Amino acid sequence: MLSYQHIYHAGNLADVHKHALLAWMLEYLTRKDKPLTYMETHAGRALYDLTDVAAVKTGEAKQGIKKVDQWFDADHPYAKVLAITRATHGPDAYPGSPLLAASLLRPTDAIHLAELHPREHSALDLAMSPYPVKCHLRDGFEMAFALTPPTPRRGLMLIDPSYEIKADYTDIPRHIGKLAKAWNVGIIALWYPILTSRAHEPMLSALSGAHPDALRHEVRFAPARPGHGMVGSGLFVINPPFGLAGAAKMIANFYNTLN
Ligand code: SAM
């Protein structure tokens, strides 16, 4: 049974890292007119209310986007999506990755989103109803295998699991190997937590060994509360777009200013 709900973590320092880099990559891809495919294996509900009791309970958004909003100039694609979301849904609304993608992409682009939790999927369907996207109530990797290689062929897949199942860490390198082989031009981006338990490390060693040209980018921050095991955020990107390393470095500099 799935128990993870992203509302407890929406807008935290890991989301800021993941979403700022995702927004940068999607805007980069739209510099060419050619249509693209965006796929997401673990979509969440797409629109978050940071005044929700769950978000307030953990205080993660308060230590995250609410604190670091000023890091991003108004012309950064992440800042642009934050501004659109707040203008449409109110000042405490926060865009999850599906809404971020739909805000930056064009009607000619294809968007496929998978979410396995029925309640999160209903919320996703509702939040995405203004956009021409397909929300699959299905296992994310099952959807990814079924649609890969996608049409249009250029594009990006975000893999953002909740890592509720220990086997995720061993299964993911195998799944990604299969996807990268079937879609050799696709940008495949995996988010992962940096954990004090170091449970993520064997997964990263396997991925780095199999995909030596991928970009691995990590930022560190203090745990959200004493004893919390997540102390950083990582993104592993196969076929990284030109310029991503520079954009990521700028974001890492921001994280270095946190105390
Ligand atoms: N990508 C989202 C974002 O950045 O806004 C957050 C996604 S959250 C970390 C992970 C989501 O994956 C949860 O909503 C959870 O219900 C869902 N999930 C868990 N296992 C899944 C599976 N096997 N297939 C699809 N979705 C799954």
Image (cartoon, rainbow, N blue to C red):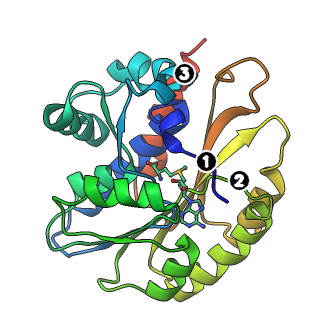
Which quarter of the rendered picture does the C terminus lie within?
top right
Local crowd at mark 3 within 10 Å, few (<14), some, or many (≥20)? few
Q: Earlier in the sequence, mark 1 or mark 2?
A: 1
Find numbered disc 3 in the image and state the secondary structure of the residue it sits on.
helix
Q: Earlier in the sequence, mark 3 or mark 2?
A: 3
183 over 25 or under it: above or below: below
Read off the residue under disc 1. 4
Image x and y of residue 41, in percent:
50, 67
Q: Is residue 192 left or right of residue 134?
A: right
Find numbered disc 1 in the image and state the secondary structure of the residue it sits on.
loop
**Which residue lies most toward the top here?**
259
Read off the residue under disc 3. 57
Image x and y of residue 44, in percent:
45, 53
- Between the C-alphas of marks 1 and 3, the distance is 15 Å
- Between the C-alphas of marks 3 and 2, the distance is 20 Å
Is residue 137 visible in this depiction of the protein? yes
Q: Residue at x 67, y 60 (%)?
A: 1
Q: Amino acid at mark 2?
A: Glu
Read off the residue under disc 2. 164
**Quarter-wise, where is residue 242 in the image?**
bottom left
119 over 207 or under it: above or below: above
